[in-house]
Amino acid sequence: MKRNWEIDELIEYFTFLPNELSLIGNKTSGNRLGFSVLFKFFQYEARFPRNKSEIPKEIILFISKQLNLNPSLFDKYDWTGRVIKYHRAQIRDFFKFREATAKDIDNVTEWLCKHVFYHNADIDNLKQEAYNKFRELNIESPTPDRMNRITKSAIFTYENQFFQETFNKLSKDTLIKMDTLIKDLTAYDENEIDCRQRDFLSFSQLRADPGRIGLESVFKEIIKLKTIRQINIPDNLFNNVPQKILKKYKQRAVSEDSRELRRHPEPLRYTLLAAFFWLRCREITDNLIELLIQIIHRIGVRAERKVEKEFINDFKRVNGKTNILFRMADAVLNNPEGIIKDVLFPIVSETTLNSLVKEFKTTGSAYKQKVYTVMRSSYANHYRRMIPKILDIIEFRSNNDVHKPIYRSLRNY
């Protein structure tokens, strides 16, 4: 139970109703206060306190004021004798609760495994769900120590079932490849491996982030993906398993060395490895997509900067273009047979006209065409080595009709 209470909370949860006061009856002062505190504690928690210190003093004081009793009487309440046992029985009977049996505990443990653990494996959440279930069944919750054992038992049972089910879904070939991978690749120093010359990476490299954009990072991510795909872990192996649970198992596989992993029973070992490789495959795919997006963005940005740099020295924005156009049109209409230098140059200087042409080239279609030319050159000279490799290893899909032409182009690339 929490230690600090607002006055509104005390009024809501610890105020006695007339039918509740009648249950107190003619008990002696000390027993009356002790019974009342137990009653309200049970009503709120669906269990009895382990000891007197578990009950906040604010609650004792609030209840004692309602009964016109001295709060110090609670210290004299016998916590171990027959009286408190009788009081507990009275309270259970009033709320139509009963004590938990071994079968009740087994049933709640099984329920946790089937309905709760799958959605949230946090031990505090499991414990709270167990308390809620006992309350729902009108069963007095076990002691906190017993609840800890119940939740740990649920976790142990669920995980053993999960490990065995996962193990049963993995082919013999996949098991052999995972064992070979952690046995052989952990023997290599990642600094000794040239990812362009080998078709495999060390275990530590498989879990490393891609790093800065470049040929090396792209090639290494591609080899990571190829290495993991060769294991042939079923794509749907963990489709219905919460990411939080999978990440926990993945982190465990990462933190243990290969010797520790090999000492585990087969169902546990292969589940940890499968979770690591299954999640890592998706993370690397996401990394490659992110790299592809960044590369395309970089090609465009660098091309624009290069073109802008070429134009910037002789670029001069011309103001009042609408007025210039009007004056030029008026002059041409008034002198349709005239010579340009005689009709237009007195109105708009040759320098201004040159500036207008340059401005159009740097902001209009000519500018865009120049940017595309630089982009194509950049791709041909550098990025051609990496982009096709990314497109080859990633499978693109789309259910959107608008995007399907692009998807078909990528598929036929």
Image (cartoon, rainbow, N blue to C red):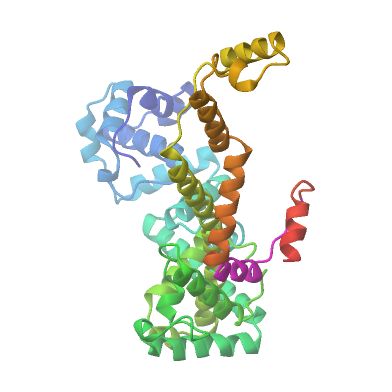
Q: Nearer the viewer, residue 366 or 157?
A: 366
Counting from the top left corner in percent of width and height, residue 281 is at 56, 70
Q: Tell how many labels.
A: 0
Q: Position of residue 373 (x, y in %)?
A: 59, 53
- Residue 35 in which image quadrant: top left
Find the magenta span and give its range: 384-399
| Front in this rendered view, residue 48 or 345 | 345
Residue at the spot 52% in from the left edge and 25% down from the top edge: 350
Direction right: furthest residue: 401
From what the image shows, is residue 151 above or below residue 130?
A: below
Closest to the observer: 62 or 68?
62
Which image quadrant: the C terminus? bottom right
For residue 27: magenta?
A: no
Q: Residue at 28% x, 37% y: name it.
A: 56
257 horizontally vs 91: left or right: left
Image point (63%, 71%), residue name? 393
Q: Quadrant of the N terminus?
A: top left
Position of residue 265 relative to residue 285, above or below, is below
Res. 101 visible in picture: no
Rendered position, 84 above or below 198: above
**408 with respect to 63 (left or right):** right
Could you say where residue 301 lies in the image, as x and y percent from the top left?
A: 49, 48
User: Residue 387 in the image: x percent, y percent?
Assistant: 58, 65
Residue 385 on the magenta span: yes
The answer to whether residue 201 is seen in the rendering is yes
